[in-house]
Amino acid sequence: MSKVKPAPLPPDTVIGGYRVVRKVSAGGFGVVYLAVDNEGQQVAVKEYLPSSLASRSPGELLPQVQPEKLSLYRLGLKSFFEEGRSLAQISHASVVSVLNFFRENETVYMVMNYLEGATLQDFIITARELKKQKVFRESTIRSLFDEILRGLRIVHQHKMLHLDIKPANIFITDDNKAVMIDFGAAREVLSKEGNFIRPMYTPGFAAPEMYRRDSSMGPWTDIYAIGACIYACMQGYPPNDAPQRLEKDRLALALSRLRGVYSDNLIEVVEWCMSLDPLSRPQSVFALQKELSREGERRYTKLSVGEKMRLQFDNMVTDTKKNVRKATGFGAKLK
């Protein structure tokens, strides 16, 4: 029998001066709400509420934690709070904006801008259903990830890692801005430290070292996921996950079928980012940016990321929104 998930806060609950409107999404690590502040401005509020460590009955505010799980719950709470503190110091268009973070009801809440649009995954699925030869044009891929990498570089400069980069966590706003959402570093702390937490990695996007408790993670771990996201934008579906690749690696074969559709440079960048050996990958975002821009400057018209994305996304937005017509919070795909 599956475990019952903790009940979300009821509508009209006020926390930290924010009034809950409705639940947007829920997962193993917490709940995301649409809320409004004292001026009526919409925000997204993410509540730390790991379902493997805490329970909550409908109508209640306080989570219930069993004594043997309390230390792990507090460890995750501390990591979540520190993640909010760190993100609040980052101001970049491609990184979700943390407006506030606070403790209340024996848990922690993170307040972010409320974004409207759809995820990159939604666009990939739409393109795949339209049976396009190229899921995305190469110029669009380069522009999109140039902008994402600018934000990721700032994240790494703040001594943070994302650790859950995937198309579902890249949000494309209605004005064609790409934003990284739903950071996974606090979740990773729990999965490494506790036997109660089952690691929840999205197949294809998690680097091999994330599956080993004793492995060292760094910028190269996020870079693997960036390579996997570019692959998904080219192929229309994720690459094989890391454990499968360690047994039999078919990445080069899959990419070889894209030669002639995409440039050799872009294919080689994906192979580089997705090297199974962490030391064989780019060791910094700057190194990856340098390689991506080298080919881009030579072959592609210099348009802003918004202009390039608009050229492609405007052709897909109507179809995508038929499937995803929702005002999504900062991330509908919360784990």
Image (cartoon, helix red, strand yellow):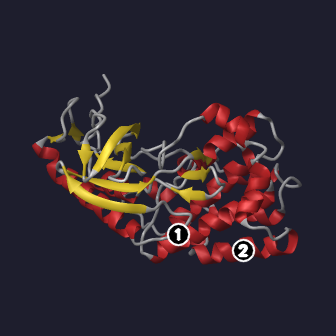
Q: Residue at x 65, y 37 (%)?
A: 321
Q: In front here: 173 or 271?
A: 173
The x and y percentages for residue 210 are: 45, 56
Horizontal and vertical percent for residue 127? 74, 40
When asked about the image quadrant of residue 286, the answer is: bottom right
Residue 330 in sight from this viewpoint: yes
Kind of residue at disc 1: His
Residue denoted by label 1: 92
Amino acid at circle 2: Glu
Q: Is residue 86 left or right of residue 241?
A: left
Question: Which element is circle 2 on?
Answer: helix
| Count of marks placed on residues | 2
In the image as oriented, which residue stretches furthest toward the left?
67
Which residue corresponds to the image point at 63% horizontal and 41% vertical from the top-left?
122
Estimate how packed mark 2 is, as few (under 14), some (14 to 19) or many (20 or more) residues with alpha carbons within 10 Å. some
Question: What crowding class fits label 1: few (fewer than 14 Cα within 10 Å), some (14-19), or many (20 or more)?
Answer: some
Q: Quadrant of the C terminus?
A: top left
Quadrant of the drawing holding the N terminus = top left
Does 172 sit left or right of 329 as displayed?
A: right
